[in-house]
């Protein structure tokens, strides 16, 4: 069985992450309940004729992919696997409201086409002229991890050599508005740096695209190795810590072997309890990191955590702003990530230095 | 590692039947399920025909013993009914006896409720329970809950009209790699104003019965359906002494990389998908006994698919037919619907007629099988293609 | 007729998000599809809706659009002859 390497990254997020030469040197501290991405100049990457019909999610996905391909020094890949919780939700909103507002008349196809969940993956394939395997996973907070698992299986079995994977989601006004009504979005503006002390329900909604070239060949550009990923549709709070330990054991590791634990806590007092036991018991002697105060919450926010872990393992440094406790390690070999959203769709991901 | 990927159970609900037996009966009697749309109020009622399932949401609620405060979309109802039949037909009584996952596929998801309550959500809090049910993963989570699948690998694929074929493909990979012992794979999509109007804007909806591979085809009929298959590893089949209905022998996915919605003239993606599936199965084209074509009856698909079939099979194109004239195009569910039909074809050694065919297409000389044909079948190839250039092929076989 | 042609150019730029273009960039006899402006089959569907909404002309077969949408000249001529509003 072959090993699986992260050979490049490309990130568009609420922080200025599209520049691979920087690593969170210039962090924006927001005070809001909804935060948007910091846009790169999309025109630098997409010809105007192709860009004119592209939804925000498509633009973010295509550009993050191109950054990832550049970073890997590749012209193309063998396969493209995308995760998105909601797809191009603005176009879905636009098409539904047009149906209602115009009583099913004068509707145009563009917003319908872009509502199709695999439109980002399809457009990346079109842009790259990649005729290989192309899947899109749409399973809430496990959308990105599903893409990761699929790519990992194929690379291990040597079915493909380079696979582009990514997570992408965009903000839509109506979607945010209705999720505010059911308390999934925080009622008040929260300062990013105080996210975990907000003491309120809901999350700070956001958007982003994080893409990676995974390969079964190690290159000079390699960031890290993907040792394992495991998904759970349900997991009672009381089982999280035990499941984490079992997951490590399946990979011949113990708690003490983990140098950094990266948690997906988002400041929602109803659901951050899922992280508590890991934080204050099981991994209390382990350096801990969080990231959703930087990138906000969206179905594929965990792909930002994956980006963060990749950067840390390659650069062997941790930005101050992500530290969750005061423990320090001198070198980082093994990172464990755990994420869930609203108590469902949990994932454990294990990355190693190489 | 499991060498074989056995199909040990299946379930289905479509416009031609509420279970596997009813679907098979309609298939061999050439009974199509296409009519004017009844459950959705649309201005296009006289311009389109659909494959609609007769049960109302209220009837599903009763069948599944759900309390009235449930927030099931119609997609979730359909999916649950079909998945439960699949589990039962596989004789599974203890879902936890083996590592069991669920891979579902949908494109509509909870859109039926979203389009109904889009503005009401802002004012009427009794409708707000459906907000969480909108995203595509929601119906899958509900199906998992109904089957008792917990703490396991559950995910959703959405690649437009090839989605469920891709769910089967991932399921097969998970069994082969030993990640799971058993996986329920399939898809569900209900009719919605969203898809009716969407396909209407693309001007590819027929105002009459759809006619796959006919020179004068006018477009597709949308349909609603769900189907699931139980895939099990060799080890489970041996340990439980399971009856194997068929095997998933080959699979291939490729991208046309040609256009956002249309297929390329030469069917590059379709060609690559079929070639890959043959390679995984270790078959030559001569080994295929029947092709259950995607055959949506749009001008573009049938021409592109036909050409791709000719590129793969040359002079010896096997018997082929599309069953879309029976069910309509059931979008993300289509790959699973046609997987069930493919397995039934193998089990019964029959090829279903391509209904409504009258006139030979002028671009090529291959003709679909138009009468029910009995012939020994060992292998069936099933094609599913979707927007975004997504092309998938699955090969089912009697033998491992 | 000239006013209609100007109006068509403005509508096309707006409807099809031809961001970096102005009406002056489109000559009346420029090919709109293929090598000219580079519009594609999805744009053709958008233009069909524009015909319906702005000029009350209903096309039922997208193939009919090919000749009509050849250039601004052909569109203007067709609309002048068939418009119902």
Image (cartoon, coloured by chain):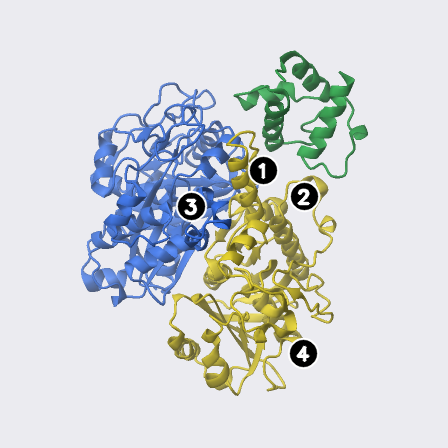
Chain colours: A yellow, B blue, C green
Res B113 label: 3
Q: Position of residue A17 (x, y in %)?
A: 68, 64
Q: Which residue is mark 2?
A: A51
What is the C-alpha distance between the residues marked 3 and 2? 32 Å
Question: Which residue is most to the top?
Answer: C81
Q: Residue at x 66, y 17 (%)?
A: C79
Q: Is residue A266 above or below residue B397?
A: below
Q: Residue at (51%, 28%) from the top-left corner?
A: B203
Dot 3 surroundings within 10 Å: few (below 14), some, or many (20 or more)? Answer: many
Of badges 3 and 2, the one in the foreground is 3
Residue A320's tag is: 4
Q: Quadrant of residue B348?
A: top left
Q: Nearer the viewer, residue C43 or B307?
A: C43
Looking at marks 1 and 4 on the same chain, the residue that comes earlier in the sequence is marked by: 1
Mark 4 residue crowding within 10 angstroms, few (<14) / some (14–19) / many (20+): few
Q: Secondary structure at mark 2?
A: helix
Mark 4 / mark 2, whichever is N-terminal: 2
């Amino acid at each position: 069985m072959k090993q699986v390497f992260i050979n490049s990254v490309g990130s568009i997020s609420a922080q200025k992450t599209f520049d691979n030469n920087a690593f969170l040197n210039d962090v924006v501290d927001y005070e809001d309940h909804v935060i948007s991405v910091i846009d790169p100049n999309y025109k630098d990457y997409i010809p105007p004729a192709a860009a004119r019909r592209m939804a925000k999610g498509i633009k973010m996905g295509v550009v993050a992919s191109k950054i990832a391909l550049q970073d890997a020094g590749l012209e193309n890949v063998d396969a493209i696997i995308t995760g998105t919780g909601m797809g191009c939700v603005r176009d879905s909103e636009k098409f539904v409201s047009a149906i209602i507002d115009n009583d099913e008349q004068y509707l145009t196809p563009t917003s319908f086409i872009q509502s199709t969940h695999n439109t980002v993956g399809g457009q990346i394939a079109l842009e790259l002229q990649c005729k290989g395997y192309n899947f899109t996973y749409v399973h809430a907070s496990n959308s990105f991890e599903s893409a990761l698992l699929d790519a990992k299986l194929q690379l291990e079995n040597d079915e493909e050599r380079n696979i582009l994977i990514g997570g992408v989601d965009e903000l839509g006004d109506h979607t945010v508005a209705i999720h505010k009504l059911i308390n999934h979005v925080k009622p008040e503006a929260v300062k990013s740096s105080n996210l975990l002390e907000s003491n309120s329900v809901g999350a700070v909604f956001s958007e982003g695209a994080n893409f990676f070239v995974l390969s079964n060949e190690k290159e000079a550009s390699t960031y890290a190795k993907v040792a394992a990923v495991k998904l759970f549709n349900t997991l009672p709070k009381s089982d999280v810590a035990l499941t984490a330990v079992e997951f490590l054991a399946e990979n011949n590791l113990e708690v003490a072997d983990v140098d950094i634990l990266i948690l997906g806590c988002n400041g929602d007092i109803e659901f951050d309890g899922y992280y508590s036991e890991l934080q204050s018991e099981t991994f209390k002697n382990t350096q801990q990191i969080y990231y959703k105060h930087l990138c906000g919450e969206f179905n594929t926010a965990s792909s930002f955590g994956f980006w963060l872990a990749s950067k840390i393992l390659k650069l062997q440094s941790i930005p101050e702003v992500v530290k969750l406790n005061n423990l320090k390690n001198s070198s980082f070999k093994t990172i464990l990530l755990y994420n869930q959203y609203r108590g469902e769709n949990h994932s454990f991901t294990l990355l190693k230095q190489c | 590692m499991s060498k074989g990927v056995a199909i040990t159970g299946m379930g289905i609900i479509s416009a031609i039947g509420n279970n596997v037996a009813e679907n098979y009966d309609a298939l061999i009697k050439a009974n199509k399920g296409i009519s004017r749309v009844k459950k959705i109020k649309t201005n296009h009622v006289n311009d389109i025909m659909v494959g609609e399932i007769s049960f109302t949401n209220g009837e599903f609620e009763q069948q599944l013993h759900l309390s009235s405060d449930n927030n099931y979309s119609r997609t979730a109802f359909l999916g649950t009914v079909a998945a439960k039949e699949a589990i039962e037909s596989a004789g599974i009584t203890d879902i936890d006896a083996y590592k069991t996952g669920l891979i579902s596929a949908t494109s509509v998801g909870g859109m039926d409720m979203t389009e109904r309550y889009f503005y009401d959500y802002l004012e009427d809090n009794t409708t707000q329970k459906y907000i969480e049910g909108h995203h595509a993963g929601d119906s899958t989570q509900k199906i998992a809950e109904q089957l008792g699948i917990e703490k396991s690998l559950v995910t959703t694929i959405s690649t437009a009209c090839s989605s469920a074929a891709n769910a089967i493909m991932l399921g097969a990979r998970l069994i082969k790699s030993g990640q799971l012992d058993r996986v329920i794979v399939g898809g569900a999509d209900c009719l919605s104003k969203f898809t009716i109007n969407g396909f209407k804007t693309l001007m590819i909806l027929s105002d009459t019965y759809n006619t796959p591979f006919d020179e004068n085809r006018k477009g597709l009929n949308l349909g609603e359906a769900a189907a699931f298959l139980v895939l099990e590893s060799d080890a489970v089949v041996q340990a439980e002494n399971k009856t194997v209905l068929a095997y998933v022998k080959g699979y291939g996915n490729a991208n046309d990389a040609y256009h956002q919605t249309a297929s390329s003239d030469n069917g590059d993606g379709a060609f690559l998908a079929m070639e890959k599936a043959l390679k995984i199965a270790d078959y030559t084209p001569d080994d295929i006994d029947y092709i259950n074509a995607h055959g949506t009856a749009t001008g573009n698909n049938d021409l592109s698919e036909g050409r791709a079939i000719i590129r793969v099979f040359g002079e010896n194109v096997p018997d082929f037919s599309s069953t879309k004239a029976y069910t309509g195009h059931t979008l993300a569910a289509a790959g699973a619907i046609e997987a069930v039909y493919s397995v039934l074809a193998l089990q019964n050694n029959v090829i279903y007629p391509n209904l409504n065919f009258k006139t030979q297409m002028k671009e090529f000389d291959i003709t679909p099988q138009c009468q029910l044909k009995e012939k020994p079948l060992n292998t069936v190839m099933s094609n599913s293609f979707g927007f975004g250039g997504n092309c998938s092929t699955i090969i089912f076989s009697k033998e491992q | 007729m000239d006013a209609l042609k100007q109006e068509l150019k403005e509508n096309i730029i707006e409807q099809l998000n031809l961001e970096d273009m102005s009406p002056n960039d489109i000559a009346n006899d420029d090919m709109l599809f293929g090598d000219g402006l580079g519009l594609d089959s999805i744009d053709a569907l958008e233009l069909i809706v524009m015909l319906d909404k702005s000029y009350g002309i209903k096309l039922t077969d997208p193939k009919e659009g090919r000749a009509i949408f050849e250039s601004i000249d052909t569109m203007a001529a067709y609309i002048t002859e068939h418009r119902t509003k």
